[in-house]
Image: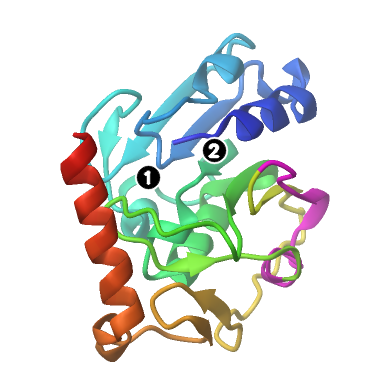
Amino acid sequence: MCHVSCIVFGVNNFSEAEIENKRIIEIGSYQVNGSIRPIFEKYHPSEYIGVDIESGPGVDIICEAEYLTDKFGTECFNVVICTEMLEHVRDWRTTIKNIKELCKQDGLIFISTRSFGFPYHAYPNDYWRYELNDMKEIFSDCEIIILESDLQEPGVFLKVRKPANFAENDLSEISLYSIAANKRIKELNNKHFRNFNYIKLVAKNILWKFIFN
């Protein structure tokens, strides 16, 4: 998945030298409303692998984000891309850990995700919202090259380099805003999915899909 603003960010902030003959993985590659893949492929990477939880356009391999390193190993990609996916994975810590571990030392990570104020959008679920300060803290173990807000809709863009002396952050104490809990929390539990506001959001989303599909 990829918003137009995400594609523009990729065009403006990645060079041919960073992509050519490099091994690339895109996590959450199912093409729904656009894809950054054609932009990167025109620079002739040695390999471009699209991964998602189900088959479809842009998906080469089916794998859940929590098991990426089990599937591919560690430090095996020069560029790791994750656009519009992090808000949809419940175990965000393991997913981000895997993103960092997949990336080779001196490799690049590109992430886009949604912030507070962006509406509920299930694919198949919607859990978290990330702010600039959240990303700054989460990726303080990397060299942050670009960190900026999406000026079109609430969201953030991030480009980082994994350093040669990489020492992974402890993310256990970080809280994020949860759309299910309607507040910042460290962990989601089942009671958060039983609150009235969240049930209303889910019902509204289902009704919207029923009417327009």
In-front residue for pair 74/12: 12
* Residue located 40% across and 42% down the image: 28
Mark 2 belongs to which amino acid? Phe
* Residue located 70% across and 69% down the image: 167
How many neighbours does mark 2 have within 10 angstroms: few (below 14), some (14-19), or many (20 or more)? many
Residue bearing mark 1: 72
Furthest residue in direction front, as rendered: 211
Query: Which quadrant of the figure contains the C terminus?
Result: top left
Q: Secondary structure at mark 1?
A: helix
Residue 27, quarter of picture = top left
Q: Is residue 58 visible?
A: yes
Residue 36 located left or right of residue 132: left
Residue 158 located left or right of residue 60: right
Q: Is residue 151 magenta?
A: yes
* Residue located 74% across and 66% down the image: 141
Residue bearing mark 2: 77
How far apart are the two marked residues, 2 and 1, measured between alpha carbons? Answer: 9 Å
> Of the residues under marks 2 and 1, which one precedes in the sequence?
1
* Residue located 61% across and 24% down the image: 22
Give the answer, above or below, for where 68 lies relative to 187.
Answer: above
What stretch of residues is rendered in magenta?
134-152
Give the answer, above or below, for where 90 lies relative to 205.
Answer: below
Q: Position of residue 184 (x, y in %)?
A: 56, 84
Q: Position of residue 118 (x, y in %)?
A: 54, 57
Q: Secondary structure at mark 2?
A: strand
Q: Position of residue 111 (x, y in %)?
A: 61, 47
Q: Is residue 45 magenta?
A: no
Is label 2 in contact with label 1 (beta carbons under 8 Å)?
yes
Mark 1 belongs to which amino acid? Phe
Q: Position of residue 210 (x, y in %)?
A: 16, 44
Query: Which quadrant of the figure contains the N terminus?
Result: top left
